[in-house]
Image (spheres, rainbow, N blue to C red):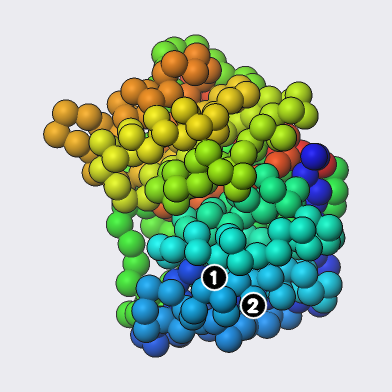
Amino acid sequence: MRPRLPAPLRPGAVVGVTSPSAGVPAELRARLDVAVESVRSRGYDVVVGQCMGGARHVSAPAADRAAELQRMLLDPSIAAVVPPWGGETAVDLLPLLDWGALTAAEPTWMVGFSDIATLITPLTLRAGWATIHGQNLMDTPYAVPDGLVSWLDLVALPRGATVRQTSPGRYRGGFVDWAEHPEDDTYVLDHAGGWTRLDGGGDVDVTGRLVGGCVETLASLAGTTYLDTGPLADLGDGLVVYVEAAEHDAFTICRYLHGMRLAGFFDGAAAVLVGRTSAPDGATLTQHEAVMDALDVLGVPVVADVECGHVAPHLPLVNGVLARVEHSATTSAITQTLS
């Protein structure tokens, strides 16, 4: 099944905000307001749902979160759904969603990363919707560095458009306390660092359909119908698989990646991209070594420190579309074709 792209957003389009995983605590509501206003400033209306509570690790009971998310995704008046951020247990929504209805419906843009990958990656692989692994809503106020685009740019592009992004060669160390600085909109990219090829030397120039997400959340779906990359690989274009570690140590990430490989998640990969991470190394195993321990057997280019992880800035990727990956001594770029 060739992934279907949602319609481009036009001025006046409605963006839905709901928290299918973690909600927003009271001390961060000011940041939520800033984030919502950043979307409205682009000419869109914003509707905030009821499942937003931040007192626990989830915003509401699973049935309520699933119902609100599905209502927004199937509502033809809502053009995009953007959660505030990820969380821990979005996996509990998967059996509660009506996958038949989602597959039959016209697709809606859904955007996010971290635990939101637990939802957007199955939406691509099982329902056939193109989805965006990119900034969450709370990250949206940040001005993107030269070479990158915002999810707000992607959702407005016409079908068939091509967008090329290049590594800025710098990244942010640490985080900003949004409780104290809810208005923060400028990345301080205080560390130098570009992409790193892990499997050897030489230039990389490969093409395939994008699919991937957060290792810690997707590993629990390996071997299930929610993470079956077979239908996407069967299109014959090859896959560009991207993965990123949020916080677990190198030994845990190594085990997760082995399991995902054994379950077939990387079958058909023409290359693997690995997001830059601040997750800890092990005493005798680095995060880079963990990746190669699990994936070297694939025999494909493996490029790490890509801007598709929890370390800012963020390079948004559209699950399901064709992408060309170029990496050399002078170029680190991803070109996506929205078709």
Residue 190 at x, y percent in the picture: 34, 50
Q: Quadrant of the C terminus?
A: top right
Left or right side of 334 for 321: right
Which numbered marker is on residue 317? none
- The amino acid sitting under disc 1 is Pro
For residue 154, what is the image quadrant? bottom right
Figure label count: 2
Residue nearest the observer in this picture, 42 or 136: 136
**Regarding mark 2 in the picture, which secondary structure is present there?**
helix
Which numbered marker is on residue 68? 2
For residue 269, what is the image quadrant? top right
Residue nearest the observer in this picture, 32 or 225: 225
Residue nearest the observer in this picture, 28 or 64: 64
Residue holding disc 1: 20
Q: Does 267 appear above or below 320?
A: above
Query: Residue farthest to the left?
Result: 283
Earlier in the chain: of badge 1 and badge 2, it is 1
Marks 1,2: beta carbons within 8 A = yes
Image point (33%, 72%), residue name = 177
Q: Quadrant of the N terminus?
A: top right
Q: Does 84 appear above or below 208?
A: below
- The amino acid sitting under disc 2 is Glu
Image point (64%, 77%), residue name = 68
Classify mark 2: residues with Cα within 10 Å, few (<14), some (14-19) or many (20+).
some
For residue 325, what is the image quadrant? top right
Left or right side of 124 for 250: left
Classify mark 1: residues with Cα within 10 Å, few (<14), some (14-19) or many (20+).
many
Q: Does 199 appear above or below 38?
A: above
